[in-house]
Structure formats: C-alpha cells, structure tokens
Amino acid sequence: MVHAKDVDCLFEVRGASYLDGVCNGEFSRDGSFTLGLGGERSRYIVSVKRNSDGRATAHWNGTPGSNSADHPLGSLSRSGACWIGEQTKVCAWKIGEDRWFADSEQTSPAPQDFSARSEMLGDELPTQPVRSDPSECAGYLGQTVETTTVVEALAPLRSLSGKSEFETTASFQSRLRSQVTGKLDRTLIIGKDPQDRKYFEYDADNRLLRITKWAFDNETFMFDSAFRHGSALAATQIQVDFANNIGVVTSRSAQVAGGYVATNGFGATVDVVRYQWTTTAIFDRPGANYTDLFPGADKQYRVVGQLRLDPVEAQRIKSGLKVGFVVSPKPPYMVSGSHRPHSPTRDSPQDITENYLVLVANIQCGLLINSDNKVLGAYPAR
C-alpha cells in the first residue's frame, strides 16, 4: 500500500539541487518512497528503496520531465529525515516543519504525520518518550546480568486465552494481572546475538574497539503492518507510525517453503521463491524523522561507544560479544500474528510470509555484554 502526501523536499546530486520545496511524495509501508511526482510542480523524480540491511538504494529520472526513475544513484544511509550517499542527499519533512538535519546542532522536531494507527480496543497509551537517565544505564557497567528472550519473556501470556463474550472485563483483567505480576511488571534484559561482528570495529592504531548501532539492530520490521494484522490480549490501543518506529528485531530465521512461476501484465515470467520467516521483536514507540534507537550515537559513523583495548584483548573478547536491551514491558505487552511484509517483484522475486511475536516495552538502554555476561558498555536509548 502506498500513502501519497505533499512534503517539503530536498534532493541534491553532486551539490546541485533538483528538488527544493514542496513536492508530492509517495511512501510505502516498508519505508521506501518516491519524491517529485505531481505534474507541473516538479520536473525531477527520485526513488529511494529501503533494503533489508538498513540502507537504501536510490534512482532518479536524470532528464527533466522524464517519468522513469532509472538512473542509479548508489547506496544511501539514513541520517535524520535524509538519506545520504557519496554524492546524493534525499530529504523529506512535514510542510511547515523546520528543516532539521541529524548532524546539526538543532533540536529534533516532533514526529511527522506519515502515520497509521492500530486499534487494539481500549484506552490509548501515551506516546511521549520518557528520557532514560544516563546514570541509570551506566549503573549496569561491570555488572553480571541475566538475559532472556522475547519468547521466554512472553511465555506466561502465550498460554493465556483472550477475553470471551461470557467473561467480565474485571475477570479477564484479573487473569491478565496474575500472569503479569512478578514476570512482566519489572525490568528485563532481552539478549541478542550481534547483527554482525563486523559492526564491532577495532582500530589497532588507536587501540579502540568501536561499537556501532548496527550491532544492535540492522534489520527492518514492518510494525505498522504487523499491528494491523496481529492480535493483542490486553485492551490497549497502540500508536504506530506509517514508516518510522523505535523498535528492534531480536531474532529472525528463514526457511524456503517452495516456489512458483509468476507472470506480469507484459507476459514476462520470473521464478518466485516462497519463504517462511519467524521473527521476534521489541516495539517501543513511533519515531520522528527516522529517529535513531540511540540518540547519543555519532551521526556520521553511528558509533554508540568505544572500549580502549590492546589488540590481543580485543581479538580475544570480540568473538564472544553479544548485546542486550534493558526494557520495561507495558500494555498490551504482546502482539503476535502473521503477515506478508513484501510482495514479490521482478527485481526481488521473494514471496515472504512472516510469523512474528512482538514484546511491547520501553527500551531504556542497550548493553554490550561479554561471554561471561559481564556488561562492558551501556548506552541510553531514550
């Protein structure tokens, strides 16, 4: 599904500006978008396609008035409301909003209104983020911690049946509280293997092991789609942004489930592979302008922290490092279901069905943990 909206655009190639002002944008649920559509108002079009590794690939029409965005612009990385490559910058802001750049000294603006709402019955949760105290995160340094998984954390609720028409709300809430008390009404640490150990970058010249945000989360998850298609036990309404949300994938596995030959309207055929994904994730809140999970991360290199280690020690501990998230679960605690996050295309002939289990919680800190479960780094996530 595509959502069309006028936005404040900026599109530059090699320092030259091709879009600068109000233009039409089309935004997909996976975070991909196209700017510059809309007839007389714009002669240029740029298309940004989100990739599964957290980056994006861009194309533009290159010729004024052309309707085909088929000139490649290379790979882009997200920076605030912008996607930036070696020679390209593509940005979109809400009309009337200050043009805020992630590497500037300005204060981040309020969330854009490219949003959808998933209604889970009862009252609406407050969505204003609560700032975490850096000293609270720092209190984990040097501590030996016990981690759990999303599946383990939500085990008490997975066996709980939903409210039936013959049960009073008070009775259901009593059953729910009995499963939450002492289990989900406390701080948890959700563990995760790092996204890729290459995101722990060692600089031998300066004897620094740099920890980048990609080690914690570098996979996309369509929370908007998941919450529309999923179900929740608790009577709570969840606000989810159309494309920008604060949350992390904690595990994902994929299995091939067959395939078929697909034909488009022009008669071209392609072999499509069916995949069955199983995903667990944590959802915190809607984001703003592609807000980073770690607001204190270096905006250029996405470094959240660093350890001073000699080469021998760095090599020894790197292979055993893992990450964790300090979270405070909140209603409705759990959303589960199945959806199809991506439709097959000629360029990406994959038909994916994703089964998911989501823990709804405030993410307070990200932790860097060694093989002995000792915390070596703690980074505020709010």
Image (cartoon, rainbow, N blue to C red):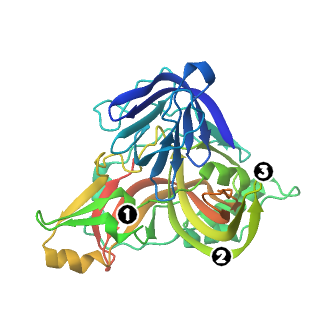
Question: Total marks drawn?
Answer: 3
Above or below 234: residue 206: below
Residue sitting nearer the eye, 153 or 204: 204
Label 3 Cα neighbours within 10 Å, binned few <14 / some 14-19 / many ≥20: few
Gap in angstroms between the C-alphas marked 1 and 2? 26 Å
Which residue bears the numbered disc 3? 265
Residue at position x 55%, y 69% from top?
252
Residue sitting nearer the eye, 270 or 216: 270
Which residue bears the numbered disc 2? 256
Gap in angstroms between the C-alphas marked 3 and 1? 41 Å
Check if mark 1's residue and mark 2's residue have beta carbons within 8 Å: no
Which residue bears the numbered disc 1? 215
Mark 3 or 1, nearer chain start:
1
Check if mark 3's residue and mark 1's residue have beta carbons within 8 Å: no
- Res 271 → quadrant: bottom right
Residue at position x 75%, y 58% from top?
172
Mark 3 or 2: in front is: 3
Q: Where in the figure is residue 187, as x and y percent of width and height? A: 46, 61
Above or below 159: residue 24: above
Image quadrant occupied by the N terminus = top right
Circle 1 SS class: helix
Q: Where in the figure is residue 219, as x and y percent of width and height? A: 49, 60
Residue sitting nearer the eye, 36 or 256: 36
Mark 3 or 1: in front is: 3
